[in-house]
Image (cartoon, grey):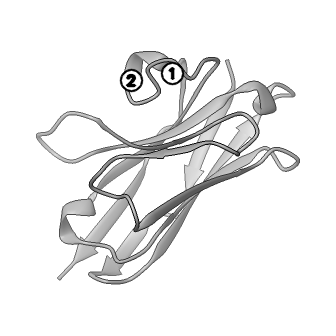
Amino acid sequence: QVQLVESGGGLVQAGGSLRLSCAASGRTFRTYFMGWFRQAPGKEREFVAAIGWSGASTYYSNSVKGRFTIARDNAKNTASLQMSSLKSEDTAVYYCAGGTSSIGYNTRRAYDSWGQGTQVTVSS
């Protein structure tokens, strides 16, 4: 497993932008398939985006496609989620996750490491 810590959450106006970061510890970060999930009050945790080991492959949920960009920097052991054109529906706690396989990348069970979450609130 790899230890993950999210940061960058906050309050932003609808239509604005926000960048979330995920700091990972350990020498094995580059071997992890990284993902971002989010959970709103009263709702289940849902997939947002994922990125492969090298960063060449990226995946997005339909709700954020074209607005969010996932990236990683293996040299710095970090992953990020750049969010733009934010909507009220994007309000949630965002979690960084890591797994050793890309199989089922859009499901929670594919990941064995999770951050503590960071709150993102979009006002209108």
**Residue at the extreme left of the image, as rendered:** 42
Q: x, y percentage for residue 115?
A: 53, 36
The picture places residue 33, in percent across and down from the top left corner, at: 63, 30
**Badge 2 density bin: few <14, some 14–19, many ≥20, Cα 10 Å:** some
Write down the quadrant of residue 122 in the picture.
bottom left
Q: Residue 90 or 2: which is nearer the viewer?
A: 90
Q: Amino acid at mark 1?
A: Tyr
Residue 43: x and y in percent read: 15, 39
Where 8 sits versus 34, above or below?
A: below
Q: Is residue 109 toward the left or the right of residue 22 in the image?
A: left
Specify whether 46 is left or right of 31: left
Query: Do callouts 1 and 2 mark residues in contact (Cβ within 8 Å)?
Result: yes
Residue in the picture at 35% in, 79% down:
12
Determine which residue is flagged by label 1: 111
Horizontal side, residue 16 vs residue 62: left or right: right
Instruction: Inspect the image, locate mark 2, and give the three-letter code of the amino acid beneath it.
Output: Arg
- Locate the C terminus by quadrant: bottom left
Q: Residue at x 35, y 74 (%)?
A: 11
* Crowd band around label 1 with a 10 angstrom C-alpha radius: few (<14), some (14–19), many (20+): many
Nearer to me, 60 or 88:
60
Secondary structure under badge 1? loop
Q: Quadrant of residue 28?
A: top right
Numbered label attached to residue 108: 2
- Mark number displayed over residue 18: none
Q: Is residue 50 left or right of residue 100?
A: left
Q: Quadrant of the N terminus?
A: top right
In the displayed structure, 92 sits above or below 2; it is: below
Task: Classify residue 24 by image quadrant.
Answer: top right
Q: Residue at x 29, y 51 (%)?
A: 62
Q: How many marks?
A: 2
Element carrying mark 2: helix
Q: Residue drawn at (26%, 61%), measured in percent from left and top?
A: 91
